Amino acid sequence: MSIEQLAETAQAMVAPGKGIIAIDESTATIGKRFASVGIENTEENRRAYRELLLTTPRLSQHISGAILFDETLRQSTKDGTPFANYLAKQGIIPGIKVDKGTTALAGCPGELVTEGLDGLRDRLKEYYKLGARFAKWRAVINIAEDIPSGTCIEANAHALARYAALCQEQGLVPMVEPEVLMDGDHDIQTCYEVTEATLRSLFGALHEQGVLLEGTILKASMVLPGKDCDEDADVEEVAESTIMCLKSTVPAILPGIVFLSGGQSDEDATAHLDAMNRVGNLPWPLSFSYGRAMQQAALQLWSKDLKGNVAKAQALVFERAKANGLAAQGKWEG
Ligand code: 13P
């Protein structure tokens, strides 16, 4: 696999006005989302729900790629077309979450490290054969008293870089995701400092391990006050802080940055992305790779009638894709 091919895929992932739909919840996580609306967590319900999302009419107008979970990459539409083939035919690039989730970081109370490196080379080989052309790995950075530690930031950056180097070796574009969580009562300045340290460490590790940035996508969290912080930040402050933080840490050669929604409301996730793109003159395209902010309205509606509400739920998915596609160009009108 040449760097040109990786770069081409990475650029297509952040094509103007397009972003990524994240539907890569593990079986346990989708179970929590289903439980919140009273849906049973069976394999068929997971398949039917993912089919609903992926077969949304005209989705490819605003969606360039979809991140799937291992089980979903092996599943098919009800007429027997593997999801990866269905997506590729629509011009949507299939992606795959390859980390195996987080575990407590030994010696660092309250902190997490992401696992999944063992055997990753062979899994990536198989995922490529199944049609995946990019992969995602999520690291989690918690903010609380005295954390994150430098040890935690570095351990996660090192794992992200090892995963990214393996992806490129196997012909998949790595989407590197160091998520700074919104949980807590910290202020926006604290989030800024932690995000800056995290990204600085990540790009250092990527450089050390020979990862080619031209064939890499960053999935970033926005710079926001913690969920329980007393002081709110307005849309402009979030947009300006996030851009300043990214500009001071992310090399301009990166093909693009996409954001996770991280528990923001649908409206906030769109408004923040739109405001950032209205600033203009940025070194990289800024787009979205939302999970909850793409899906939650559709899931709510679908749960009320799993057979009867498919088309109506798909209309909501399309609405969210369109709004975020406009926000990726700074053209969302609210
Ligand atoms: P959210 O947009 O729901 O945060 O999910 C995106 C994602 O892929 C987190 O890993």
Image (cartoon, rainbow, N blue to C red):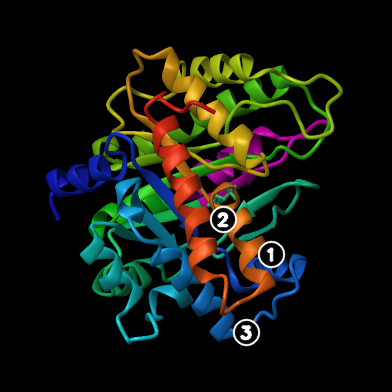
Q: In the rendered structure, which disc, 3 or 1, sits on the residue that comes first in sequence?
A: 1
Residue at the spot x=41%, y=23% of the render? 330
Front-lying residue, 253 or 318: 318
Point out the stretch of residues depicted in magenta.
138-161
User: Which quadrant would residue 46 be assigned to in this image?
Assistant: bottom right
Could you give the CA–CA distance between mark 2 and mark 1, rounded to whole angstroms?
Answer: 10 Å
Looking at numbered disc 3 in the image, what kind of residue is underneath it?
Thr
> Do the CB atoms of the residues marked 3 and 1 lie less than 8 Å apart?
no
Q: What element carries label 3?
A: loop
| Whether residue 24 is visible | no
Label 1 CB sits under 8 Å from any ligand 1 atom = no
Q: Is residue 202 above or below residue 117?
A: above
Q: Which disc number belongs to residue 295? A: 2
Label 2 CB sits under 8 Å from any ligand 1 atom = yes
Q: Quadrant of the C terminus?
A: top right
User: Which quadrant would residue 183 be assigned to in this image?
Assistant: top right
Front-lying residue, 181 or 302: 302
The residue identified by callout 1 is 33
142 in the magenta segment: yes
The residue identified by callout 3 is 42
